[in-house]
Image (spheres, rainbow, N blue to C red):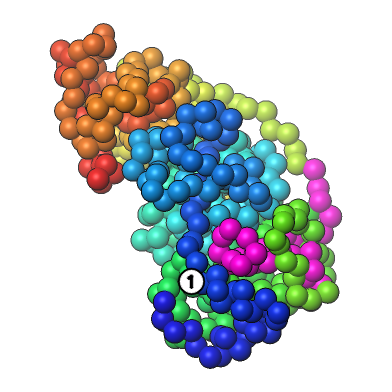
Amino acid sequence: MEKLPQNYLDEAKTIFKDEYDDYLESLSSIQVNGLRVNTQKISVEEFIKIAPFKLEKIPWTDDGFYFDEQDRPSKHPYYYAGLYYIQEPSAMLPAQSLPIDENDIVLDACAAPGGKSLKLADKLNNTGILFSNDISVSRAQILLSNLERHGVKNSFVIAEDLLKLDRFDNCFDKILLDAPCSGQGMFRKQPELVKSYIEKGSDYYAPVQKQLICKAVEMLKEGGMMVYSTCTFSKKENEDVVEYALEKYPQLKVVPLRRSEGFVSGLTRKTENCARLYPHRIKGEGHFVALLQKGDKKENKNIEANTVNKPDDLFFRNIDMSFSNGNFIRRENRLYFEPDHPFDLKGLRVLRSGLYLGESRHDRFEPSLALALALKEKEYKNTVSLSIEDERVLKYLRCETINVSDFDKEGYVLIAVEGYPLGFGIVNKGILKNKYPANYRYK
């Protein structure tokens, strides 16, 4: 690790006090790794039964586990099936802390690479709408691929400057703002952030964070709730930012967070119900989380599912997935299912609106990987499910042609591992032509 600057060490002494030496010692310890189960595809209980990894529960989440890096879960076919997402354990707390009701309209304001959006999507349970935004188009592309692997159907991925989205004022029931920060809490995990901190410290980020939290408050509906979080320790970027928003918006209040062993309270009286996570007190990196509410909570209206007829296309006759509260939309030769929404999206950089289903080529519909990963095995009538020990699983993920003559299938098939979809292929006389996208292939 690059040598920590003296101004940071002086600040750390005021924050950690008697625990300062313990904190410094933690920076040279081995970092821990975490994964979060995709409960839209598999229950936590079922995942524990089939997981080939040594798992240990993360105490502040209901679906997160520590794992041993030697198990290499990012190389396992279950990862490609979207059964879990690899995420730093402390980073699981912000989305875990935001109460989500079904049919909420939710914004993940600085969403890339997507771990927090995935948790919010799980909480929505295929209801409502999730807007996942990141100012960087390249990072938003990574966010999009993670949402697709997760099988999320009701998300809009946009790449915009949050401060310019005035059209969304008073629109969201819930907002997660994991703000850009100086990254002090990630120095162990990402030592290169030390150099970045030297170039841009708390004095650079705090004014930006104050602008962002105020914009997020304005985008909240009356009664709405939001989480403000960072992966830094600085009081300037945490408690001072929250107190700035509390002073500017008298209707805003701090909501107490559920405490977990090792958590530390906020550093001031007004923020004592916030949570600080320190790497010498917990198994994880550093984080700050505040849960805020704008005015009094209002009850959500129940929305009855309005089922939509599927396109009159031969391919869709094999699909038993329910499509509701939205519309099928064609853009040139591409087909999407877009959730109903009241927003004006014209002029915005929208990378994805809803579920991308596929495209028409040469009078034939070619389904997308996003559709495959959004399906369950029982929702597609022509499925080839391989066991986890079958060598054809990795061959398929490497985009190779495979022999499936032991299955009585022809035409478009959904390839699955132990019943969990991976992607599509075309079978002709027992040989599968691989349709797995090359940019997703197993390496």
Q: Main secondary structure of the magenta part?
A: loop
Q: Where residue 18 appears, x then y in whole percent?
A: 71, 79
Extreme-top residue of the structure: 408
As drawn, 325 above or below 443? above
The N terminus lies in quadrant:
bottom left
Number of numbered markers: 1
The C terminus lies in quadrant:
top left
User: In front: 354, or 227?
Assistant: 227
At x 50%, y 57%, the residue is 32
Whether residue 271 is in magenta: the answer is yes
Q: Is residue 322 left or right of residue 352?
A: right
Q: Where residue 261 appears, x then y in whole percent?
A: 72, 56
Whether residue 222 is in magenta: the answer is no
User: In front: 306, or 277?
Assistant: 277
* Badge 1 amino acid: Ser
Q: Is residue 6 visible?
A: yes
Q: Is residue 98 left or right of residue 149?
A: right
Q: Is residue 376 left or right of residue 108?
A: left
Q: Where residue 416 appears, x then y in whole percent?
A: 36, 25
**Residue at mark 1:** 28
Q: Is residue 222 visible?
A: no
At x 48%, y 71%, the residue is 28
User: For mark 1, does the 10 Å Cα neighbourhood hold few (<14), some (14 to 19), or many (20 or more) residues?
Assistant: few
At x 50%, y 88%, the residue is 5
As drawn, 440 above or below 187? above
Q: Where residue 339 appears, x then y in whole percent?
A: 53, 38
Q: What's the magenta region? A: 270-299
As drawn, 180 above or below 147? below
Residue 104 figure quarter? top right
Q: Is residue 230 left or right of residue 158?
A: right
User: In front: 393, or 49?
Assistant: 49
